[in-house]
Amino acid sequence: MITFEGAAKFYPDGTVAVAHLDLTVETGKTTVFVGPSGSGKTTSLRMINRMVEPTGGTIRVDGADIRDQNPAQLRRSIGYVIQQAGLFPHRTVLDNIATVPLLLGWRRSRARARALELMDLVGLEPAQAKRYPHQLSGGQQQRVGVARALAADPPILLMDEPFSAVDPVVRTSLQDELIRLQQELHKTIVFVTHDIDEAVRLGDRIAVFRPGGELAQYDAPERLLAEPVDAFVESFIGYDRGVRRLSFFPASGLSLREDVVFDDEDRVERAQTLVAGENEPWALVVDAERMPKGWVSAEQLDRAPSGVPLGSLDLAPYGHTFDVGADSLRAALDAAVLSPAGRAVGVDEEGRVVGVVSQNDLGAAIWSVSE
Ligand SMILES: Nc1ncnc2c1ncn2[C@@H]1O[C@H](COP(=O)(O)OP(=O)(O)O)[C@@H](O)[C@H]1O
Ligand SMILES: [Mg+2]
């Protein structure tokens, strides 16, 4: 547990980097500091490992005042990852990762073995061990940075915008890796970002900082999106927070329609009767394995000659599906909005169609969870 008790940082030039911070970072959880540029996130983070000394207040790690600890020793027990990875350019990947173990006096063979183990953990190939940082992509460099910070197995990991300099696709995969790693390692992670979406994805708790180095709100992501405390937080998290909040509700609660799903071998008239009777504008066609093939409209069915199998009609693309067991209401809504039929296709873990849900039915389900 890391506690900030009235922690403050004023610079001699009059800048208030952190005005007054009271906050508890829970052990084994990911806490995200998010806020606009200059709101004191980095300063707050660096006060934890004494790279910045507070001008007021107290910071404790597991109850012990960090002022009573040797700064170099403290830093070795706290992993630190920054943007651009901050790797040593003239050391190989392996030597970069082994830095802290060697500083701690580990034997070379043990440090190297540990470094290789960590490369595997963060998804780097052993063949990359002998490369130098400039021979790696930005995403790979960040992985090395994470491996280096984890090398001595510190209980605390501080990460300052570690993924901000890589492109969005790589960033998403690094975020996924961090989520996976954290499920395995349960470190106390403090993660700084200016990106609210990244904060919501990664954080168990989110601290929103405002200009002037003040804490505006400290909450679980779901509560933050549901109940921003003031206009600043509301505008910072964005006006689409209602949609983003849906990512916290599972799609498994939706009731899906199966009666408008037809086999591609089925004849046109079979679908016609049902679709007309139910006043449904769209039917979904699946193959013998129940994999989706596409949408057919009621109008198309009206025009089609009877006796024709549904699979031979010109089907509209089904777009992307959502996994009924694993995805959220947000994924279902996204699939419905992007579908030419205005309906989302729900599938099981093998991709087989479970049923479909319309935007209207989704709206009703969303309304009921938003109450
Ligand atoms: N060494 C310094 N001297 C004077 N002002 C500083 C110094 N370091 C940071 N600041 C100021 O403190 C404020 C907070 O900075 P920082 O913690 O880096 O913000 P963030 O990480 O949220 O962007 C900013 O206004 C910044 O300019
Ligand atoms: Mg910063």
Image: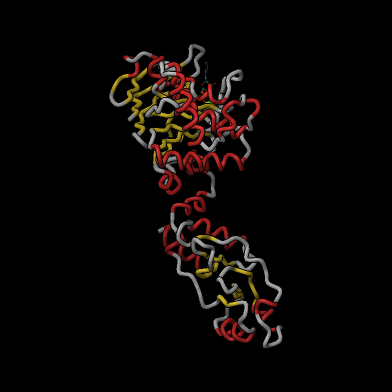
Residue 301 left/right relative to 277: right
Is 20 situated above or below 323?
Answer: above
Farthest-out residue, top: 12
Among the 4 quarters of the image, the one containing residue 24: top left
Q: Where is residue 198 in the image (x, y as percent from the top left)?
A: 52, 40
Specify how the rendered protein is coloured: secondary structure
**Placement of 327 over or under 305, stated as above or below:** above
Q: Residue at x 49, y 52 (%)?
A: 242
Would you say residue 52 is visible in this rendering?
no
| Residue at point 50%, 36% (across, down) | 120
The residue most toward the left is: 63
Counting from the top left corner in percent of width and height, residue 236 is at 52, 40
Quarter holding the N terminus?
Answer: top left
Q: Is residue 278 left or right of residue 209?
A: right
Residue 116 can be seen, yes or no: yes
Residue 338 position, x and y percent, is: 62, 60
Q: How many labels does the image show?
A: 0
Q: Tell me the quarter of the image containing the C terminus.
A: bottom left
Task: Write the residue at 51% across / 43% down.
Answer: 176
347 to the left or right of 26: right
Quarter of image, res 266: bottom right
